[in-house]
Amino acid sequence: MKIYLDLIFFINLIFDFLLLTSVSLVLKRNIKWYRLIFGSLIGAFSIFILFIEINNIQLFIFKLIISIVMIISAFSYKNIKYTFNNFITLYIISVFLGGALYLLNIEYSYRNSGLVFYHHGLSINFIVMIIISPIILYLYIKSYKKIKYNFQNNYKVDLIINHKKYQFDGYIDTGNQLHDQYKKRPICLIVNNKIKYSYKDVLFVPYETVNGHGIIKCLKAEYMYINHKKYEKVLVGIVDHKFHLEGINMIIHNDYKEDLI
């Protein structure tokens, strides 16, 4: 059996560089490229452990040590939390990439007859893996940032209206710039069927946006609590349609964002 060390070393180097670059992008580390290469070289040299007879526990410990050295070499050491976040993110991305490549390889390498799977001679070669990996990582980073952004703007909200407490899953929308024309108060939005009210409590408030102007039904909440932060005399606009955000039934005004950061 021939082992091409130069090829294995090169592939290891490429994958370690992709992983460290992904960590840098996900955590916004803004690290110089030559530090990422240096960290990748340390990871690539770990292939020589293949020629040392050690048990599984020793191999696991060695891999952990190599990963920590890679992380510190690429991102330096600032504190334990900083290094730990880098380390965990590296492993999460590694598991995601490894799982995706394994799934693709199984998909194209095996056929099935009922519940019986058999190998039919095809598999993803090294060149295809190197080409596909950046695409997989790009999609992962893009999805991660989108999910992270959405969850950063999600808040639990308690509204006190007519001495009754209502709970909402709120989302701070930078596009919500609604203010009433009289006192310039910000207007949050809630779905109509999430609250009980009588029309004697309704305020008809004119508004104006870049798309036009109109009148919106509003209720005056005595208090609003966003993550236990208290706000008084809040205007809440009532809309009849559901919001196109999963699990969200309240749109928080953008003016509250700065106070919650």
Image (tube, helix red, strand yellow):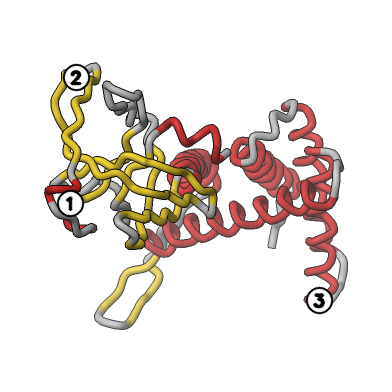
> In front here: 215 or 93?
215
In the rendered view, would you say 142 is above or below 109? above
Residue at the spot x=72%, y=27% of the render?
A: 33
Quadrant where the N terminus sits is bottom right
Residue at the spot x=84%, y=39% of the render?
A: 76
Query: Residue 50, how many percent across, how many down?
Result: 79, 63
Q: Is residue 139 visible?
A: no
- Check disc 2 and report its element: helix, strand or loop: loop
Q: Which mark is residue 57?
A: 3
> In front here: 226 or 42?
226
Query: Residue 174, how many percent across, how many down?
Result: 39, 30
Give the amino acid type for the residue marked by disc 2 in the picture.
Answer: Asn
Q: Which residue is mark 1?
A: 192
Query: Residue 78, how many percent across, how many down?
Result: 85, 41
- Left/right placement of residue 258 relative to residue 63 reads left
- Left/right placement of residue 112 relative to residue 6 reads left
Quadrant where the C terminus sits is top right
- Left/right placement of residue 22 relative to residue 238 reads right
- Check disc 3 and report its element: helix, strand or loop: helix
Label 1 Cα neighbours within 10 Å, binned few <14 / some 14-19 / many ≥20: some
Query: Residue 140, how many percent across, how many down?
Result: 48, 46
- Check disc 1 and report its element: helix, strand or loop: helix
| Image depth: mark 2 or mark 3 in front | 2
Residue located farthest toward the front when viewing the structure as drawn? 200
Label 3 Cα neighbours within 10 Å, binned few <14 / some 14-19 / many ≥20: few
Give the amino acid type for the residue marked by disc 1 in the picture.
Answer: Asn
Among the 4 quarters of the image, the one containing residue 251: top left
Q: Which residue is mark 2?
A: 211
